[in-house]
Structures are given as structure tokens and as C-alpha cells.
Amino acid sequence: MLHRIRRLLAVSAAALLATTVLVGLAADPAQAQTYGSLPLLGWAYTDSADPSTPHPDPAGNFLIGTRTDTAGTAHTGRAYFTYDITGMRDQVLHRVTFYTYERTVDDCTKVAPIQMWRTTPVTAATTWDDAPEERELLGERSYGSGVICPGAYLDVDMIPAVQAALARDETSITVEVRISATGEDAAGLARTMSKAAISYAVNHAPVVSGVKLRYPDAGCGTTEEPPPASKSVQFQATVTDADPSDYARIYYAYWPADRPDQRKETAYATPDLTGIADGTVIAWTAQGRDNDDAGAWADTCYFVLDTVAPATPPVVSSEKYPTTTYPGTGGPGVPGTFVFDADGDVDTVAFDWYEDALITRVVPDHPGGRAEAVVTPRYSGPKTLKVAAVDAAGNRTAWVEYRYLVRDTAPFAVFELNGVGLTSHITLSSSAAEVTGFGYAVDGGPEVRVPAVDRTGKGDLVFDSVGTKTVVERAYAGDEVIGVHTDQIGVSDAPKITSAEFSWSASPVAGRAGTFTFAPRTTDVVAYRYGFGDGNNQSVDAGADGTAELSWTPQEGGYYTIYVTSVDADGDVSEVGTSSFWVIDPHPVVSANTYGAQVGQPISVDAWSDLPDAVAIVYSFDGGPQQTVDGAWAWFEVVPTHAGDSDLVVWARLADGGLSPATTTVLHVSSAPAVTAQGPFSADAVELRPVTFTFTAAQAGAASFRYTVGSRYDGEEHPEHTVAAGADGTATVTYDVPAYWGDVTVTVASLTGDGTASDSAEFSVAVRNPRVAVTGSVSGAGVPAQFGFSGYELNEYTESFLWHVGDGAVQEVAYDPLAWETTVSYTPETAGAATLYVQRRFTDGSLSPITEFAFDVPAS
């Protein structure tokens, strides 16, 4: 909408003037500062004993105060240092420190009043009699008694003095170091100082420029003429920083122009204008910040908030695409002009529209007028064009949907690609009854026109290179284009490979011969190079027609790919043509699950043959008779009668009654003993209780067992034990489980009488915790309290808990299986330290280890 701009009060405008003060930021750690030392332009020391002799730029240290030499001459010293401060200009000063160190002190028991003055610059002619003029006392220190001596650090903050010098447009600053006039002649106060320096930490504050509205694109704006903008307004500014490594950011501030107390700051270019009324004039500005400093705020800009979209939605029409009725109009590739009409609403200054892509904006010839957009459909079928009217603030009306139907007129192309330099063919067709011809063009080249006969046209193409080609096809009714389609096709000069025997649709078998035919896809082919990816490449000559045949017999089954290139008369080699296929292995495929296999237990076997004439699976196990299972796939079981290896031999029986080559699979049955365990309650072990292991030999003639037992997690080397096997080939051993968490693992092998060892077996059982967990607290003597008892594990075997405090009587409480813990009540009689003792009774009558729970009884 158009709005009347309210004038701002003069006091409001004055309050909004941008400040030029550089403000230090405390929110982020210092990262942008530059560190260094000011250049020393010159320095000198003066000596009262040699008042007319200059000492410019001496080496070494300097004397302050009065010191008498061995000849009895008193020397009073001062020093002057002049530094270049031009590099400090236009920077924020974070630290500028003049400093020096004591080297020697005549008498550390005396306190010396040391002064630092700003003076006029030092020169090569500076002497005691012609010394720089003292202008400003920068600092005074009392060194000697009570501080480090000698070696005290003398420093003064130079920021105020440097800022003042820069304000006076001076290029240097000079600092004098001396003992104050009241003590300069006193004995014992003299000291030698090191050559002084000024260190600094400075930073250029970022600068913003180019402050304007990005959306809508409306410049900065003034109080008299603020441009309208919606709540989707976006600010824009550019920030620069003279320190190239600094991370400079832009911050924005905004507020109702007549309410500066509502000022907000943000790092985002889109302000939050929630709650601000339509028609409010908004003031805003921008500032650059790095990790140390903020630059000056830019001049204030203004806009007026406009939240009301145009009242009238756009009217959309198109002569080319006016209908949704089948079969539609126009066609793919046929452009249509769409007219957007504001219907006289002068608030409308633009139209936004989109169909399948990004939003596009068009502008009418005058506010409230018309605009046009040209849309070229890519495909046939129903389409929806969405249009909205837009005012100067960027507010849109609701989207108006214009629906239309694109007629199916695009040509359809079928290509016969024959390579490079050879003639390829294109066949074009269209469903449009009025089609009279077709055109096609390759990679933007000239269009070839062919007539349509029964809505079909045919043409030839000759490609001069390999690669992806863009072919644009057009359907014509007379000279009018009624449909367009584009194809991306790949042109290759790789040979064409065909074979009746070696293809995915065939069933080639290893050992049976077949033939490949190689045909050219380029001109003047004289030979072909081929290989199967194994590095053994060979050649075959081409015939007069450029083709060649290759007879080949696969020796093994499996996946194959043949790689073929053609070679022309000039020796040029084509791209690689490939053909992949599967060759059947005549040997059957056998899969047997021997995991955990034991003597006398069946082993499951799957066997199958891919031979097309296989009718049954035949097998023999461990030298036994042949067994037959009908079908090309079979499942059966074999039962080992001894430990070790047994051969399983499998054939496929063919339709002619013969057998395929055999597949022999070795089935291994472990000779390791079988192991079982029994703890106090189950197969699991329990801490501090014995667990029993039973070994059952699988090895024929086993006379004994050799084993180790312990935890895999205790980090110890477990000793080896031997136990004799009984007549039934078994033995039982018991292990007392120590107090640790984890498992108990047995590693065991059987031994025959002559010491022959079987395979080893490793068997582990979990160790369960029998202890009691205790919770509770005590408030004071005479105050009833509760304790909670629970088991970490073995709750299913717990009957009750036995407990007592100190040397009190033992009490028993039944285990509550429905609660998280079993609770008991206890009232302490006296204050002080106490201990609760508790254990649980299991279903076999045994007791767990005692758990001690120490607690303090506060005084009531």
C-alpha cells in the first residue's frame, strides 16, 4: 500500500545520529590484535659529569640517579627514548607499554623515586646542558626496599599519551627515565637500567560501507522519503578490515524511528519486526566488528513498514495455452506468452511467477498495468503457472494458479548408432495428425529436414567424433514448429561384440567352445585387439568388410568380461568395447555347515549344479556308496563316524546318464573334547563358589585330558593340569571361582596313551555376583530409618536377607521378588559411626559373602 510518511520529531532525529567512537568488545576472546614494538627513532643518555657531550644511540644500559666513580667524580644520569607512533594512527590501542628493567642497584635498602616523563624529541646533539624539555609526567614508581632488587620491572601505560600525541598530529613520542628531582642527587639511589622499549597490541576496527536495503532493492532511505518494505526486508552492507587475517562481521541495529529506546542489534540481515505496526518508520544502521573491536556505526537509513499486499490478485491469460481440455494446445518446445494483469490496482508494481523453476519477477509498464512472460513447456501434459502481484515493499498477494494442458506433439526419436565416420540412422515419429515433417540438428549444427509419411520420418547421421551428442528434434506442420524434444546420445567407436554362445541369455559351460564376432564402429579397421582382463591380450585380423571372428573355449567357470578395441590402417586405436557373461562351472557347488560338528551328529549339506542338463545330485561320503538326490539342487545330511577329515565327493548326473566332473569337499570334525559346566544353581559360575566342568572325549583312545582354567580378563598365566579319562571317556574337574567379575574359561584337549593330542576346545561360562547391594541413610539417634537390600544377580535363587548392625542380633527378612529392593526398618539408639552387615540366603541354603555398609548416625 501507499502510506503517508509521518515526520520524525527533531529530538528523535538528533538521538539517532551515528557515533564515531570506537568501542572495545568484551564478548569474544582477543584474536584480531596485532602485536609488536614501536620503532625506536633514537635514544640518548646524559651525564652531569660531562654536561656538554652528547651520547646518541649508545650500546648497553644507562644510569639514572647519582653515582660516584672510583676517582670521586659524581655522575648523575638520565635517558631519553623517541619512538615512531605513525603506525598507531587509525587503530584501536589495546596495550601500549613503555618498559625497562633494573640491571644494578647501588643500595636496595633505599627507596628510589623513579619518574617517566614525556619530553620533546631526542636528537643527536642531546646533552645534559641541552636536554629535551619535560612536558608531562607519565608515571612515578618507588623501587628498592620491599620489591625485587635488583631486577625490578619498570613500566607505564602509554595509551593516553600516544592517543593525545596522535590527536596533536604528532609522529613520535619521547619518554625520559630519571630519578625525581628530590632524590636525584641522593647517594645509594642510583641504578643501571636496560635499554627501554614500547610494546603494543593494536587493532584496526572494521569499517562498513554500501549500506542499503537488499530486499526490496531500495537504497538507504531518508526520514523524508523512507522506501516501503515488508517484514521480509533484508539489510545489506559491506565490511572491510585493514587487518587481512581478522574475521570481520556485520551487525545491524534497528528501531522504530520515534522510539530509539526499542533499539535491537542482530547479526542477521533480516530483522525481527514482530509487533511493529504497519506504517511505522524504521531506522537502521550497520557496524563492523571483529573479535576485538567494533567500528563506527554507519549513517542511519530508514524505511517504512508496509505489511499489506495489493488488494487485487492478478488476472492471467494466454492465447497459446488457453485451456485444460484434452488434447490441449501448443506442444513441448513451443513457447507461449502469458499476460499478467493487475486489473488497475496501482499498488501492484511487479509480478512474481514460477512453474517448475525459481521465482521470476516481471515489471509492468506502469503500476497497476500488465506484464508478459514467455514460457516454453519442456513436456506435454497438465501444467500449473503460479502468479502473485507484488507491491513496492515486496508484499505478495496469494498465488493465483493458472492451469493449462500442453498437447503431446513432440517427436520421438529412435537411433541406430553405428559409430564414427559410418552412417547412423534416426527414425522420428509424432502423435500429431497434422505433422508434415521433422527436423533434427546435432550439437547446434544445421537442421536436417525430412518429410513425414504416416507421421514417421527417417534420416541419416554421420558423427565425426566420439562423445556425448545433443540432438534436438522438431516436428513441423508446414513451416510451423508444433513440438520439440532433445536427446543426449553417446557416440562411441568401440567395436560391436556379438556371440550366440557367450551372452547373458546363453548358458555357456567351461570346456565348450564358442565364437565371438567383432564388427567395426569406425572406418578402415584392419585388426582387433582383445583380452579378458588377465593381461594376456591378443590380436585378430579383420576381413575386407572390417569384421573378425574369434573362436574361444573357457577353461573355468565364472564371470568373464571380454575387452576389444579396433585398430585402423593408420594405427589409431578405438575406445574399448566390452561384453560380460557368466560361464557355468561343470563342477557342482557344495556348501556344508561344519561349525560345531561332532562325531555321530549330522552335518547339513547343500549341493547344486548350474549345468542346463543336470537332473540329479550324486554324492559319496567318507568312501561310502554313492547316494542320489533327484533335481539340480539337493539338500542332504551326512553323519561323521570319526573325528578329523572326511571327504565328501559330489557329482551332477546329466540327462544322458553321465556324471559331471566331481567336487571334493573336506569336512573336518573337531577331535576336541565336549565341555559342559555346572555351577551352584545353573551352568553359570558364582563368585567364591565351585564350578564343575565335565570333559567328554571325541578322540579315539583318549586316556587323559590336558587343560587350563581361569578368567580371560585377569591377565594371569594359568597353570596346565592333567586329569585321567574314565572308562566312558569322560572326566570331571572342579574350580573354586575367586572374587572377580567376568568369566571362567577352560581350554582343554584330550591325549591318547602315546601322548597324541586332539584339537583344543575353549569353553567359557559367565561368573555371577552373589553379593548384596545396600541403600539407605540415617537421620539421627531415635529416628526410624530404612535400608534397602537387593542382589546384583541371582535374584531368582534368593530366599531371604540376614542382617544386623554392629554386634546386634541377626535378623532375617524374606526376599521381595516384586520390589526393586527388599526394605527393613532400623532405629539407631546412639549417635556416631556404625556398620550394617548383610548377606543373603540362597535356595540351596548357602549364604552369600557379607556386605559391610558403614554409616554415621547424626546427633538428634
Image: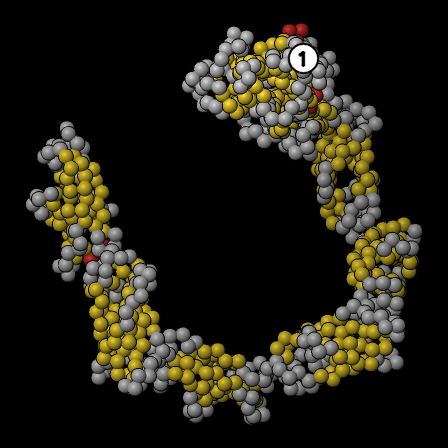
Q: How many marks?
A: 1
Give percent across and percent down for residue 733.
22, 72
634, above or below 677, in the image: below
Q: Is residue 646 left or right of residue 844?
A: right
Give the camera-side residue of 191 and 761.
Answer: 191
Q: Position of 731 compared to 526: left or right?
A: left
Q: Compared with residue 288, is residue 467 higher up or lower down, i.e. above or below? A: below
**Quarter holding residue 288:** top right
Q: Residues within 10 Å of mark 1 (few under 14, many from 20)?
A: some
Q: Quadrant of residue 132?
A: top right
- Seen in the image, is 658 located left or right of residue 563? left
Horizontal side of residue 732 vs 400, given as left or right: left
Residue at screen point 80% across, 77% down? 528
* Residue 93 image point, x, y percent: 61, 21
**Type of amino acid under label 1:** Ser
Which of 5 and 680 lies nearest the eye of the viewer? Answer: 680
Q: Residue at x 9, y 47 (%)?
A: 810
Badge 1 marks a residue whose secondary structure is loop
- Visible residue check, residue 150: yes
In the image, 737 versus 447, the foreground residue is 737
Q: Position of residue 634 (x, y in %)?
A: 48, 81
Residue 119 appears in the picture as rendered: no
Q: Quadrant of the C terminus?
A: top left
In the picture of the structure, the residue carrying the numbered disc 1 is: 52
Residue visible at 8% across and 43% down in the picture:
808
> Measured along the vertical axis of the image, is residue 311 above or below residue 448?
above
